[in-house]
Image: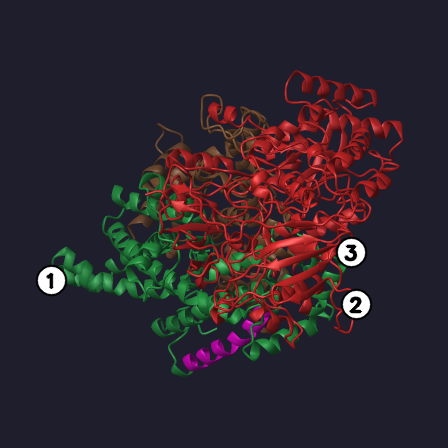
Chain colours: A red, B green, C brown
């Protein structure tokens, strides 16, 4: 067991995360845009050097919005399959996979069952543009063959790939893309498209109140094979947004009818009525039983000739984790669920019992932090010396490594507050040098001792303990995160009552500032491993999920300034300034960015797992070693 | 909960057998069934609406409570669910739809709950059927053996085994079975449930161990009942006569005693059907059987309120009907019952 | 009835060699070895419940990031859980909570059930009919499902579990006690008490209630085991005891499910403890039933 602990210590390393990423996807993207300015077509994959660390942002300078640029990306027209050099790809075979629930099929209808939907993006469903499957970096066209960006950076013209037919046999046209854009932007009949919010946020509206096309609509069909998408303003983040795992495109065959249904209610695609025939992916729908299984077969008409290698994928609903582990160990499934599926202990037991198992780690797009209510005593207001000292003591007493071990299986990464945890802003060593972020060891022990001294200075001690509470999730990591805080702060004379409640109830208490401490995850809206384009603020105008009731003076101005900048080189100094403000006032204590382990059988070849858990999970290049 | 089959129906030997009273009893029992069912539906409906927090917000926040939503979303859903009406209007609306055979649509799948239950019901029926076989196979021989070897070491051992079934939470049994099978025997049931009719062999593989786990938990009562009934019958005059005639002990027990002892056992076993079905809730989740029980759990997890209330009423309905049948059978079999 | 005779034999005068009480126990143990095992288990559990907290080897709540999920070893005999806490310590402390839930819910259900059952049987009429419909409706729910629904409505807390269990089990007590009351009503001395003008309350309290006691005991012992199992099952389904309270049910739920395959000890030890105690309660209940109410033996 001691081994287990030792093995678990490889954590918190953003450098490791970087290695996992190979090359920052956005770096590739920016190169596309930058190279585009020379009017030359650039294949993003060509600029990528998969084994080296990502280029620092200084070399990948995006065109500032004001500078007119025209970028054209033209990946190879029909990429040919490229099996690893040493091996010869073998056709055939099926793989088994588990999901926790199989009920909902259309990724636009994201009420439940995200795992199946996300796992099918890249398999049953296609994207307009996607992250290449072999390098998992940069961007390539999927249904779009190429795209160009207008002079002012706010209009994107996508050229639709020739010769793509859906599983029913109908050819892909720009109308299909348009119908999906209407869904994203206009949400006809209340279609949820909750996980595609970035598209809606960036793109102009398409229809006015009367259902007439706007003067400058967010999407307009130019011809059968080209469509123009107009953004509200220049936004280099638009392409990363479009590569997000949920942003996929149906043929308009079935969705048009659903969107125009007179009942005014949106519904899911119904596979039993053949409504999953309007897809373009490498696998086509074969059979389904709700809450039981979902099967797809090889699509013989896939636009990439010769792909996929597999005959099909069988997905089973296995809600219980013990049963999932048993199914993996006994060969009933070859990989796990798309989202959180196995704990680290179970992955280790699988690796022990099934030799050869490969377990890529997917980094979650969420960041976690402890937030402290600064509106009320004793933790507020900011500026009151006692309150400031108290928050400082808490920050010093919180060991990020302990939180990672106790709540996140020890496989998470250091997460500073907000989205400023990237090493083009501060390297991990720089973060670790900041107050409270020290690695477990002598320095952290000294910090905890310092926290104790501060608390004693405030009059607290073994016989005069501070009683407070934290609002917590009801179970799992979110709960353990709070229990970890409880345990760490009990060292410095603070007793936390962990109050468990579901998110809706918690949310109401948070909005009424009826809490002392709570922990939360902030999810990134789209796949962007290096976060060059990720917005810091995306849920609330006044500060992401910052519920603390406090923002440092000048924060908002800095934020607004960096939002319109596309270049990391320009953004980094501003973000450094913002980070310093957060660290100084200790109102929002960054902790851990979790990771997900997704084992698969050792006979897989040609499959590169995505870097982030919200990506395209295509198996089209996967083949099974004999 | 499994221990009182007979206790709940006290025997009152003062009353005499009477056909008219029997008829009256049956009629009354049938008539009372309806208000009880209405009471049950009202209880479920009210219970699920006094859940703390806004139901619409609960649903929108998703199974793990992490999804975000706007107030607009909440208002929309409240309107859609009719949550703005007073509760009795909501109940009457729901009942009138229920009576028209419309069980409503799931919030998660947006599909008809009626269809969902129709899909899941046969699966659970198969599991329950297998479990009943397991229960009979386990409990009757063990009960008989324990009675025949009364107060011997075998008796204590067998009874301990039966009581152990009652003492282990069924999910604990299920988890252990899954773990032991996969680690010890490198075996787990085939995935993707198939019905008994389509593929009997696969279906048997899928249902065998869940039925054992469920049956083990439910057989404790029947073992004890079989033993007790047989002990009583063995003291009856006709058994003594049979023995006096010089019949072999085995023949006496099998031909005379067991046959007579089993009738009430089987009848009372019927009361267990309702509990057997509620046992499927946990067993189906762990053993991966897409039946009604797992349906309820996934509805609970996704806060699918319309589905939850249908499921709970369904389970209560099964229990009510099986109790009704048992009561009627019992009245028919045992004329000493007090018709009240 | 051989066993009855044996039990009657318990009352024969003691020989002077051993004290009467000890002899009785020895005889009980010889004649009802299962029952005696049950008593032994319960006595042991009660001792652990009372003095356990002062003899636990480790801190029960203190998380230890550097001792997570250790398999059983000579420092942590039962291993550690996902927060690095000692499982043996928590199993010992869990005894208290599980027994507390079982016993308090049982007392609540027995009290409510006795009051309702005695009055319902004694007065009869419309009151009885209405009460019996409520009892019927409540009994219609399989207990676990009713518990799920009630917990969904009440929210998670230890007291709410007790409340839910009391609501679920009251009808059982009510039915049995009502039936006993009905037969007692016809007994001559109660009729006599009525004739000499005793008040209803006095008759119920002094004459009816004490005579239902044997039945109450029988139902109680058998209910406690089931209550403990329902508490655990609720926790398993995520609607039971809050996890900051150390109960065996809570130890079997939540994270335990997610880590069980890789670290089975986190579930096996609390599960075994629970099984042993419920087993003890059940065999004790059986023996008690045999002694108190030979008519109901084995049922």
Label of residue B245 in the image: 1
Report the mark closest to the observer, 3 or 1.
Answer: 3
Badge 2 element = loop
- At label 1, counting other C-alpha atoms closer than 10 Å, the crowd grade (few under 14, some 14-19, many 20 or more) is few
Residue B263 vs residue B168: left or right? left
Label of residue A215 in the image: 2
Residue B1 vs residue B334: left or right? right
Report the mark closest to the observer, 2 or 3.
Answer: 2
Badge 1 element = loop
- Which quadrant of the figure has residue C250? top right
Label of residue A232 in the image: 3
- Count of numbered circles in the view: 3
- At label 3, counting other C-alpha atoms closer than 10 Å, the crowd grade (few under 14, some 14-19, many 20 or more) is few
Badge 3 element = loop
- At label 2, counting other C-alpha atoms closer than 10 Å, the crowd grade (few under 14, some 14-19, many 20 or more) is few
Of A440 and A320, which appears nearest the observer?
Answer: A440
Instruction: State whether discs 2 and 1 lie on one chain.
Output: no
Relative image position of residue A617 (x, y in whole percent): 52, 49
Q: Which residues are magenta?
A: B21-41
Q: Mark 3 falls within which chain?
A: A
Of A42 and A446, which appears nearest the observer?
Answer: A42
Relative image position of residue B9 (x, y in whole percent): 44, 65
């Amino acid at each position: 067991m001691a081994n287990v602990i030792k093995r678990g210590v490889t954590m918190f390393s953003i450098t490791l995360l970087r290695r996992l990423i190979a090359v920052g996807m956005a770096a590739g993207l920016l190169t596309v845009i930058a190279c585009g300015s020379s009017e030359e077509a650039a294949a993003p994959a060509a600029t990528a050097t998969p084994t080296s660390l990502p280029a620092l942002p200084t070399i990948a300078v995006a065109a500032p919005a004001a500078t007119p640029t025209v970028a054209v990306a033209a990946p190879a027209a029909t990429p040919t399959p490229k099996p690893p050099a040493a091996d010869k790809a073998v056709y055939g075979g099926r793989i088994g996979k588990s999901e926790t629930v199989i009920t909902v099929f259309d990724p636009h209808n994201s009420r439940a069952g995200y795992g199946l939907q996300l796992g099918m993006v890249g398999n049953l469903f296609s994207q307009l543009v996607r992250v290449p499957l072999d390098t998992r970096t940069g961007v390539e066209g999927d249904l779009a063959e190429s795209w160009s960006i207008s002079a002012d950076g706010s209009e994107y013209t996508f050229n639709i790939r020739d010769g793509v037919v859906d599983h029913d046999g109908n050819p892909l046209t720009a109308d299909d893309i348009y119908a999906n854009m209407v869904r994203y932007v206009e949400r006809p009949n209340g279609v949820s498209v909750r996980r595609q919010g970035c598209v809606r946020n960036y793109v102009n509206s398409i229809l006015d109140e009367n259902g007439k096309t706007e003067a400058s609509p967010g999407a307009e069909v130019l011809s059968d094979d080209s469509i123009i998408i107009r953004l509200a303003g220049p936004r280099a983040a638009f392409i990363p947004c479009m590569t997000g795992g949920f942003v996929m495109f149906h043929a308009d065959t079935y969705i048009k009818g659903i969107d125009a249904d007179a009942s005014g209610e949106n519904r899911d695609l119904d596979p039993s009525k053949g409504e999953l025939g309007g897809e373009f992916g490498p696998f086509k729908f074969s059979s389904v039983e709700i809450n039981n299984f979902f099967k797809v077969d090889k699509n013989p008409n896939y636009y990439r000739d010769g792909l996929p290698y597999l005959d099909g994928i069988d997905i089973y609903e296995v809600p219980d984790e013990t049963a999932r582990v048993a199914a993996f160990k006994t060969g009933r499934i070859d990989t796990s669920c798309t989202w959180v599926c196995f704990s680290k202990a179970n992955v280790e037991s699988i690796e022990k019992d099934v030799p050869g198992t490969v377990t890529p780690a997917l980094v979650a797009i969420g960041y976690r932090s402890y937030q402290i209510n600064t509106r009320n005593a004793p933790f507020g207001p900011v500026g009151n010396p006692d309150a400031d000292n108290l928050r400082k003591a808490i920050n010093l007493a919180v060991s990020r490594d302990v939180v990672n071990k106790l709540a996140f299986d020890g496989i998470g990464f250091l997460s500073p507050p907000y989205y400023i945890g990237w090493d083009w802003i501060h390297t991990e060593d720089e973060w670790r040098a900041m107050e409270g972020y020290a690695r477990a060891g002598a320095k952290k022990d000294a910090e905890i001792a310092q926290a104790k001294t501060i608390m004693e200075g405030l009059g607290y001690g073994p016989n005069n303990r501070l009683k407070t509470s934290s609002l917590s999730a009801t179970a799992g990591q979110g709960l353990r995160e709070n229990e970890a805080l409880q345990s760490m702060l009990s060292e410095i004379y603070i007793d936390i009552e962990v109050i468990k409640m579901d998110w809706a109830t918690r949310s109401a208490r948070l909005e009424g500032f009826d809490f002392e401490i709570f922990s939360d995850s902030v999810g990134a809206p789209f796949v962007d491993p290096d976060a060059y384009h990720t917005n810091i603020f995306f849920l609330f105008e006044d500060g992401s999920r910052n519920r603390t009731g406090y923002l440092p003076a000048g924060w908002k101005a800095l934020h607004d300034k960096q939002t319109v900048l596309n270049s990391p080189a320009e953004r980094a100094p501003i973000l450094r300034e913002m980070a310093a403000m957060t660290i100084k006032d200790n109102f929002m204590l960054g902790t851990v960015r979790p990771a997900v382990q997704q084992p698969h059988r050792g006979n897989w070849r040609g499959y590169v797992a995505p870097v982030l858990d919200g990506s395209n999970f295509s198996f089209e290049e996967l083949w099974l070693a004999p | 909960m499994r221990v009182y089959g007979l206790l709940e129906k006290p025997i009152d030997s003062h009353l005499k057998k009477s056909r008219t009273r029997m008829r009256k009893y049956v009629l009354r029992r049938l008539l009372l069934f309806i208000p009880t069912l209405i009471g049950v539906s009202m209880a479920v409906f009210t219970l699920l609406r006094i859940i703390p927090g806004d139901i619409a917000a609960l649903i929108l926040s998703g199974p793990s409570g992490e999804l975000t939503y706007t107030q607009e979303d909440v208002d929309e859903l409240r309107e859609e669910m009719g949550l703005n009406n007073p509760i009795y209007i909501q109940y009457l609306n729901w009942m009138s739809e229920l009576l028209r055979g419309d069980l409503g649509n799931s919030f998660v799948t947006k599909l008809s709950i009626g269809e969902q239950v129709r899909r899941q019901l046969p699966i659970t029926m198969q599991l329950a059927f297998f479990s009943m076989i397991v229960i009979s196979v386990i409990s009757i021989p063990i009960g008989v053996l324990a009675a025949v070897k009364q107060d011997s070491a075998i008796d204590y051992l067998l009874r301990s085994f039966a009581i152990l079934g009652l003492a282990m939470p069924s999910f604990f049994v299920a988890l252990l079975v899954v773990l032991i099978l996969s680690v010890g025997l490198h075996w787990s049931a085939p995935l993707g449930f198939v019905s008994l009719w389509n593929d009997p062999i696969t279906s048997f593989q899928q249902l065998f161990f869940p039925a054992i786990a469920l049956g083990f938990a439910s057989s404790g009562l029947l073992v004890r009942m079989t033993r007790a009934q047989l002990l009583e019958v063995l003291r009856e005059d006709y058994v003594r006569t049979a023995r006096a005639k010089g019949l072999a002990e085995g023949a006496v027990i099998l031909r005379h005693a067991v046959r007579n002892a089993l009738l009430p056992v089987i009848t009372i076993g019927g009361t267990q059907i309702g509990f057997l079905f509620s046992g499927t809730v946990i067993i189906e989740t762990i053993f991966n059987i897409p039946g009604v029980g797992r349906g309820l759990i996934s509805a609970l997890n996704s806060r699918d309120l319309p589905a939850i209330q249908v499921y709970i009423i369904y389970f209560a309905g099964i229990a009510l009907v099986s109790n009704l049948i048992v009561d009627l059978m019992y009245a028919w079999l045992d004329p000493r019952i007090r018709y009240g | 009835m051989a066993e009855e005779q044996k039990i009657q034999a318990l009352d024969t005068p003691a020989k002077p060699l051993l004290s009467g009480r000890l002899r009785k126990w020895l005889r009980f143990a010889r004649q009802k070895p299962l029952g005696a095992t049950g008593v032994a288990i319960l006595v042991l559990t009660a001792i652990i419940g009372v003095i356990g907290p002062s003899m636990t080897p480790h801190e029960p709540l203190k998380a230890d990031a550097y001792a997570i999920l250790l398999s059983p070893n000579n420092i942590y005999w039962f291993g550690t859980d996902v927060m690095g806490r000692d499982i043996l310590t928590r199993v010992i402390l869990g005894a208290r909570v599980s027994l507390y839930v079982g016993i308090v819910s049982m007392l609540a259900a027995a009290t409510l059930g006795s009051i309702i059952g005695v009055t319902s049987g004694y007065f009869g009429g419309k009151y009885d009919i209405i009460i019996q419909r409520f009892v019927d409706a409540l009994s219609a729910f399989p207990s676990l499902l009713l518990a799920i629904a009630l917990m969904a409505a009440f929210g998670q807390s230890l007291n709410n579990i007790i409340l839910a269990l009391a609501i679920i089990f009251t009808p059982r007590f009510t039915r049995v006690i009502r039936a006993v009351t009905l037969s007692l009503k016809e007994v001559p001395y109660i009729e006599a008490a009525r004739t000499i003008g005793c008040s209803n309350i006095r008759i119920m309290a002094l004459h009816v209630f004490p005579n239902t006691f044997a039945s109450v005991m029988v139902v109680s012992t058998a209910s406690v085991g089931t209550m403990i199992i329902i508490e655990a099952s609720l926790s398993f389904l995520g609607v039971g005891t809050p996890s900051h309270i150390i109960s065996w049910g809570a130890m079997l739920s939540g994270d335990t499910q997610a880590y069980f395959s890789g670290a089975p000890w986190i579930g096996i030890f609390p599960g075994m403890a629970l099984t042993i105690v419920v087993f003890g309660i059940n065999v004790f209940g059986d023996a008690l039933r045999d002694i108190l109410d030979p008519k109901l033996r084995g049922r």
